[in-house]
Amino acid sequence: MSQEIVGLFEEVLNRELIQVIISKPREKSGTSKIKVRPIEEREGISFQFEKQENTRVFHENLNPYEAIERLLEYMKIFKQMQITTVSMDIHVLVSKKGKMTINKKVHGEKKEPAKLTHNRTKSYLLAEGMDIPFLKDLGIMTLTGKVSHDKYDKFRQINRFLEFVDDILLHLTREKELTILDFGCGKSYLTFAMYHYLHVLQGYDCRIIGLDLKEDMVAQSNRLAKEYGYEKLTFEIGDIGGYQGIKAVDMVVSLHACDAATDFALAKAVAWGAKVILAVPCCQHEINQQLGDNWQKSKRQQRNQQAENQCDNLLQGKQVEGMEPLAPILEYGLLRERFAALLTDGLRAEYLKSVGYEIQVLEFIPLEHTAKNILLRGVKKETARKDSVRRIEQCEEFFEIAPSIKRLLG
C-alpha cells in the first residue's frame, strides 16, 4: 500500500472522525460492508469495526495502530471506502490493479462530531434534542426538541427509513444534482426527513419532488418547505401512473402506495433507470382477488370431477391436483390475504431482478407498530438476472395469476 493511504488513515483516525464505510468486495463473500466509528474507552480513543456478514453483524474494538493495519487489509479486498469527518468527505477507490484514487471534499460548515459512547442505547440519525423545525411543525417534536409521547412510533419510523437511505449513499453520486421522486408523500414526514438528512446533514446537492393527490397537503408541504429555506424540495399534485413531470430520476421512493400503485411506481423507476428504489407496498388486493377466483374455480372443478368419478375415487383414491395443496391457506380469507401480499412482493422483487436490480427485502419497522412493514430496496446493477424470468414464469403459471407489474414492465 502507498504511503499516501497510510498517511490518510493516520490523519483521520481521531476524535473528528464520524464514520468510515467500506464496501464493494472484489469477490463474493459473506462480508458485504464494514462500518468504523470512534468510541471512548478507559484506555483512550478506539475504533469500533462493525462487520456485516449476510444477516449477522460482528463488532470489534481496535486501538488506532490496530485500526490502521485492519483498514489496510480491507483495502486489499474491497473496492471502495467513504470516510466522513467533521470537516470533510473523503472517497477512496481501488482499481483492479490496486491503484488508489483519493478524492476530498471540504464541508462548508463543520459537522457535529460522532458520539464516542458504546452502542448500548439506540442512536438515531435525527436525534431527540436536535433543532429540526419540520418535526416540530408536524407535531413529532415539542418546541424544546423532545419527541411527543404519542408520536414516538412515527419518530422511530422516520429514523428507520433514514437508516435505509444512509445504507445506499455510496450508490449516489456527489458529482451532480440528484433527483429524487417520492410518490404518494402524504403528510410528507419522510420527504422532509430525507431532504434534511441528505442536504442539510450530509451535504448532497439534491432535488426532491413529493407527489400526492391531496391539494391541501401539497399546499401545506410547499409552504413549510419555503419557510425552512428548503429551496430544492417541492411538492406537486398528481398520481403515480400518469406523472410525466421529469425525464430522469436517481432515486424513487414509494411508501404505502395502495395495491397496483406500487407497481406503477416501480415501473416508472425502471423506465427512468433510477439507481435506487425504496418501496413499502400496501393493501395488495389484486393477487388476493385472483387467488380467490382461482380457488373457487378449482373447488367447482373438483366437485364436478368427484361427482363424475365417485366410484373410481372410492376404489383407488384421487390424485391431488391444481391448487388443492394450498387449501389450508386459500380456504380462509385472512390467510389468503396475507399469503397474497407475500406472493405479490416476492414477484415484484423477481421482476426488478430480471431487469438488473439487486434486491433486498427488509423489515421496514417492527410488526407490532405497523402491518405494512416490508421494504423492497433495489440498487441498479449492470446485468439482469435471467434465472428470475424463469422463476416468474413458473410462479405465475402455477398460481394462474397476472400481476400488474407484468404488464407494466412488458
Image (spheres, helix red, strand yellow):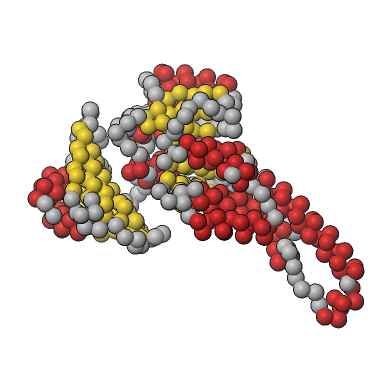
At horizontal 46% and vertical 42% (from top left) the residue drawn is 277
Could you tell whether 71 is left or right of 212 in the image? left
**Viewport quadrant of the C terminus:** top right
Q: Which of 39 and 196 is in front in this view?
A: 196
Which of the pair 204/356 is nearer the observer? 356
Can you see residue 191? Answer: no
Q: Is 313 on the left-hand or right-hand side of 126?
A: right
Going 58% across and 47% down the picture, which residue do you hit? Answer: 371
Could you tell me residue 338's position as x and y percent? 64, 53
- Say whether residue 385 is left or right of residue 199: right
All told, the count of numbered labels is 0
Image-quadrant location for residue 112: top left
Where residue 406 appears, as percent x and y from the top left, is 61, 46
Nearer to me, 164 or 22: 22
Quarter occupied by residue 392 = bottom right
- In this view, the residue in front, 320 or 147, is 320
Q: Given the current orientation, which residue lies at the most extreme bottom position?
A: 315
Q: Residue at x 72, y 50 (%)?
A: 290
- Percent coordinates x, y for residue 258 in the rendering: 61, 39
Q: Is residue 121 left or right of residue 397?
A: left
Q: In which quarter of the image is the N terminus?
A: bottom left
Please determine whether, in this image, residue 386 is positioned above or below residue 373.
below
Image vertical order of residue 72 relative to residue 376, above or below: below
Residue 244's spot in the image, x, y percent?
Answer: 53, 27
Tell me, yes or no, if residue 258 can be seen here: yes
Q: Is residue 179 above or below residue 56?
A: above
Residue at screen point 47% across, 32% down: 181
